[in-house]
Image (tube, grey):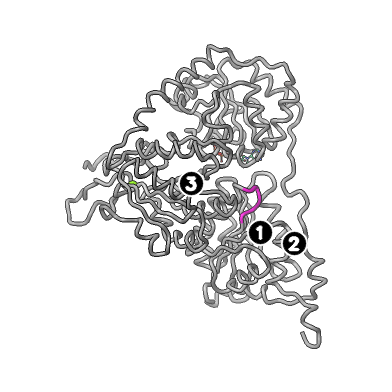
């Protein structure tokens, strides 16, 4: 530095913060520690919102959810080795879900790591991150910070979105350079999310296939929700007139109460349809790969698919008409080509689907109104359904096994991107991180419906919810265990079963320790009142909802994925 006046200098800390701000970053999900503690403090000083969590995985899940909600990369910041690894789970989750996220982790100096001299939290983080994300970069020099951040943002957003790892050796942050040169080195990324317009031949081919279908069906996925082309998707669905199934995080893109929504006739439409038009949804395990008994006779369907990722086509079934592009551009091109000349499917198909939907909804209605104590899933979630219909801007976070499956099928969503759940992996523990991100990114009330097991993976973050005074109401569906609370030790010993928890736990006491509101309820009327109070006060609230021990089933709706032993018999 010598005789240079300090005000003409900048450093790695400030260049990194300036680069993020220049590219529109407003929020960082963080866990402080060496070497990034001051980076968080300086970011806060420079006007960024920095939310510190208790564990990196939840800061990461928050960043991932923020990416989905905002169509901009969610930023998570962690310390080296263990903190990095904790955050990496969330980065891999974001990548698997096709959500933009950047994990920025501090790391040890290359000279020490590469000679394996045994540094504090030594780890070759860049190499470890690379297979678990879309791209991974390391910045070694202050003058490259602009470049590194620009590459991370573009990689996270362009094409199929995903997670990016950015490795920040501690010494980089302290590097000094001329302030004017430093500002000149930053890059504001131009059009990181470029439109991807389909070829005219692809549009013609798709219209040809779709117009021949007698029993067509849409399946709409979270890629369509992410695309934020809500009006175009709705116009396409209503113009073509097919019944549609929303995947879980596409619920509400069109209201679940829309007359074309076929959720309550899922088995019928999957089996009977002759043409399936996928919009931002993959034919992965969540759709049993487009085959098997649920899908009706083998070879009975043609598939049309919109996806931004060309190699997604034919990943599970032959795609007769691939539409490569972003959802908004493809929907626009289809609608333009169709003009006013579309023949909607015959009433014999849409009417049959509608009748099935109405029959099943009517069958369910009385069960959702029961006031049993302790509660079952129908009575308790019937209340949630009713309250979300009255409060359609509430963001619903949902995880668990039965708590997930039952809530997904019972609770209607009415607006786009109002549901955050376990995603493509079906992981447990996303709840509290997602709830924080939902409250911070939208400003709306959040309702987290959590299985008691799922909550255990992230429960400490209710302190984070209380510390930032976020409008998050968490309902613990407490049935004393994983799947069910009445399991027994198969060996007959004194230890409890591997799948049960302390009976009659009072999760509501946990939030009281941090100044939040705790309530315990054992019937639907009391649950309704407690949620209403939470919505009215917007105070951090935790409701311990007592569910009957035997109400759940093994692995919820996916018990078929459990291998079974042919020799041992319980
Ligand atoms: P779901 O689990 O809801 O079925 P998936 O995560 O399986 O949804 O599928 C989402 C798909 O959406 C991915 O294949 C992804 O490439 C695609 N996608 C993401 N963003 C866009 C976009 N803007 N336009 C088109 N496709 C997109
Ligand atoms: Mg449970």
Gap between marks 3 and 2 measured at Cα: 36 Å
Magenta-drawn segment: 70-74
Left or right side of 543 for 188: right
Under tag 3, what secondary structure? strand
**Label 3: few (<14), some (14–19) or many (≥20) C-alpha neighbours in 10 Å:** many
Q: Considering the numbered disc 1 on the image, is that residue within a helix, a strand or a loop? A: loop
Q: Is residue 430 visible?
A: no
Residue at left 59%, top 30%? 278
Q: Is residue 202 above or below residue 413?
A: above
What mark, if any, has residue 26 been given in the picture? 1
Residue 102 as seen in the image, left or right of residue 491: right
Gap in angstroms between the C-alphas marked 1 and 3? 23 Å
Task: Count residues near mark 2 (Cα–Cα under 10 Å), then give few for <14, some for 14-19, many for 20+.
Answer: some
Residue for point 77% across, 82% down: 6
Instruction: Looking at the image, tell me whether mark 1 or mark 3 is earlier in sequence order.
Output: 1
Which of the 4 image quarters holds residue 227?
A: top right
Q: Which mark is residue 517?
A: none
Residue 3 lies in the magenta stretch? no
Instruction: Judge: label 3 CB < 8 Å from ligand 1.
Output: no
- Disc 2 under 8 Å from ligand 1? The reply is no
Q: Is residue 547 visible?
A: yes
Q: Which residue is label 2 attached to? A: 147
Q: CA distance from mark 2 to mark 1?
A: 19 Å
Is label 2 in a helix, a strand or a loop? helix
Q: Main secondary structure of the magenta part?
A: loop
Q: Residue at x 38, y 47 (%)?
A: 451
Residue located beneath label 3 in the image: 397
Tell me the quarter of the image containing the C terminus. top left
């Amino acid at each position: 530095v010598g005789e240079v006046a300090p005000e003409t200098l900048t450093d790695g800390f400030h260049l990194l913060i300036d680069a993020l701000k220049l590219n529109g970053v407003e929020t960082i999900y963080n866990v402080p520690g060496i070497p990034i503690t001051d980076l968080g403090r300086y970011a806060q000083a420079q006007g960024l919102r920095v939310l510190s969590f208790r564990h990196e995985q939840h800061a990461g899940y928050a960043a991932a959810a923020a990416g989905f909600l905002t169509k901009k990369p969610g930023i998570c910041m962690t310390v080296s080795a263990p903190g990095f690894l904790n955050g990496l789970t969330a980065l891999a989750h974001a990548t698997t879900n096709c959500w933009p996220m950047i994990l920025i982790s501090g790391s040890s100096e290359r000279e020490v790591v590469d000679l394996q001299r045994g540094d504090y939290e030594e780890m070759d983080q860049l190499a470890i991150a690379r297979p678990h994300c879309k791209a991974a970069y390391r910045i070694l020099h202050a003058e490259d910070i602009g470049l590194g951040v620009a590459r991370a943002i573009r990689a996270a957003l362009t094409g199929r979105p995903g997670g990016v790892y950015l490795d920040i050796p501690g010494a980089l942050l302290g590097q000094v350079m001329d302030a004017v040169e430093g500002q000149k080195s930053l890059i504001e990324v131009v059009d990181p999310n470029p439109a991807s317009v389909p070829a005219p031949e692809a549009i013609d081919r798709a219209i040809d296939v779709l117009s021949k279908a007698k029993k067509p069906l849409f399946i709409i996925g979270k890629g369509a929700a992410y695309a934020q082309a809500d009006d175009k998707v709705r116009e396409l669905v209503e113009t073509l007139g097919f019944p549609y199934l929303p995947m879980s995080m596409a619920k509400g893109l069109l209201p679940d109460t829309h007359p074309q929504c076929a959720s309550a006739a899922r088995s019928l439409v999957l089996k009977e349809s002759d043409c399936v038009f996928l919009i931002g949804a993959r034919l992965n395990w969540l759709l049993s790969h487009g085959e098997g008994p649920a899908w009706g006779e083998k070879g009975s369907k043609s598939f049309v698919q919109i996806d931004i990722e060309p190699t997604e086509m034919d990943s599970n079934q032959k795609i007769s008409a691939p539409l490569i592009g972003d959802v908004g551009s493809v929907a626009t091109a289809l609608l333009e080509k169709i003009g006013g000349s579309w023949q909607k499917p015959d009433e014999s198909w849409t009417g049959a689907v509608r009748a099935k939907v109405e029959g099943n909804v009517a069958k369910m209605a009385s069960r959702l109104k029961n006031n049993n104590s302790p509660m079952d899933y129908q009575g308790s979630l019937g209340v949630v359904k009713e309250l979300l219909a009255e409060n359609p801007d509430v963001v619903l976070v949902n995880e668990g096994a039965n708590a997930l499956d039952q809530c997904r099928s019972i609770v209607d969503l009415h607006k786009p991107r109002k549901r955050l759940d376990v995603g493509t992996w079906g992981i447990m523990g996303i709840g509290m991180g997602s709830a924080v991100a939902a409250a911070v990114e939208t400003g709306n009330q959040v309702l987290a419906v959590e299985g008691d097991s799922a909550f255990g993976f992230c429960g400490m973050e209710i302190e984070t919810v209380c510390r930032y005074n976020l409008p998050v109401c968490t309902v613990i569906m407490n049935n004393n265990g994983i799947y069910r609370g009445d399991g027994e030790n198969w060996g007959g010993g004194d230890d409890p079963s591997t799948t049960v928890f302390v009976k009659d736990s009072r999760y509501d006491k946990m939030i009281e320790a941090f100044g939040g509101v705790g309530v315990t309820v054992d019937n639907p009327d009391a649950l309704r009142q407690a949620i209403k109070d939470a919505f009215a006060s917007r105070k951090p609230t935790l409701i311990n909802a007592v569910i009957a021990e035997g109400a759940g089933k093994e692995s919820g709706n996916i018990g078929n994925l459990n291998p079974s032993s042919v020799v041992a018999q319980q």
